[in-house]
Amino acid sequence: MDDQGEIQVNRGFRIEMNSALGPYKGGLRFHPSVNLGILKFLAFEQVFKNALTTLPMGGGKGGSDFDPKGKSDNEVMRFCHSFMCELFRHIGPDTDVPAGDIGVGAREIGFLFGMYKKLRNEFTGVLTGKGLNWGGSLIRPEATGYGSVYFAAEMIATRKESLEGKTCLVSGSGNVAQFTTEKLNELGAKVVTLSDSSGYIYDEKGIDSKKLEYVKVLKNVRRGRVKEYADKYSSAAYTAVDPALDHNPLWNHKADCAFPSATQNEINGKDAQNMVNNGVILV
């Protein structure tokens, strides 16, 4: 039920793909694009991602076509509670352990965990990505973005090079993109792009730590749009999404490295050719 008292109906899913190595493990995604096909693909992919960690985890994925963007905290909470009222019977620490994904951060995980605890009358580690105050892990929010950069650093080291001084294109502006940018800055690289579903910003001077803090407040607290970054910093140019284009112009800038950090299947053939033409040596 929304804040106007109107009943809203969304469809929820949980794909339990494979538990040969351990409990099903994979994120929950809240986004209008969510459907059964996308989640089956992501769950299939998650099986192999988790197996590569060598940890005893299977693969799964879930979510809903609910869009948290523009919703109040109360609306998001009511949806999370409704979602968990069905999901709770299918998950557990030894069965299926969901996590966050697009549209599901610490706020949503907290709402989901609160309802799980109420329904099962137990405090157990059934969800990852929780806040530190209710059983979460240190450095969990940073893990995906940092891991991406560490992997890239090892890749480029095979060429006897480092990320220091490299210009990097980063897509997205959520958890993964934020911490990818943070670690790239720490290693001496310069990040020049970020994006969201409305468009992207290109900042030739680089998105330094001070600017990144602004992005974190903008996206995590105010839940604003990346266009506001360009309004605040004159060095940045904003480009709105153009559905008519057959490529993403974010990848059509001079750079050394590219870090897709928004969603799956971001780069098509035209994007790849644009990156090669612009000098990108690492994705």
Image (cartoon, rainbow, N blue to C red):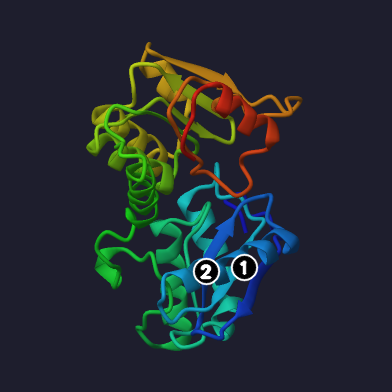
Left or right of 183? Residue 78 is: right
- What residue occupies the far front of the structure in this picture? 159
Residue at the image position 62 percent from the left and 68 percent from the top: 43
- Secondary structure category for the residue under label 1: helix
Q: Quadrant of residue 59?
A: bottom right
Q: Can you identify the residue that label 2 sits on?
A: 26
Q: Position of residue 52 (x, y in %)?
A: 46, 69
Q: Position of residue 99 (x, y in %)?
A: 46, 67
Q: Can you identify the residue that label 1 sits on?
A: 43
Seen in the picture, residue 253 relative to 104 is either above or below; the reply is above
In terms of sequence position, does the residue under pointer 2 or pointer 1 come before the other? 2
- Secondary structure category for the residue under label 2: strand
Q: Are marks 2 and 1 in contact (CB under 8 Å)?
A: yes
Residue at the image position 56 percent from the left and 67 percent from the top: 46
Residue at the image position 43 percent from the left and 79 percent from the top: 126
- What residue occupies the far top of the structure in this picture? 234
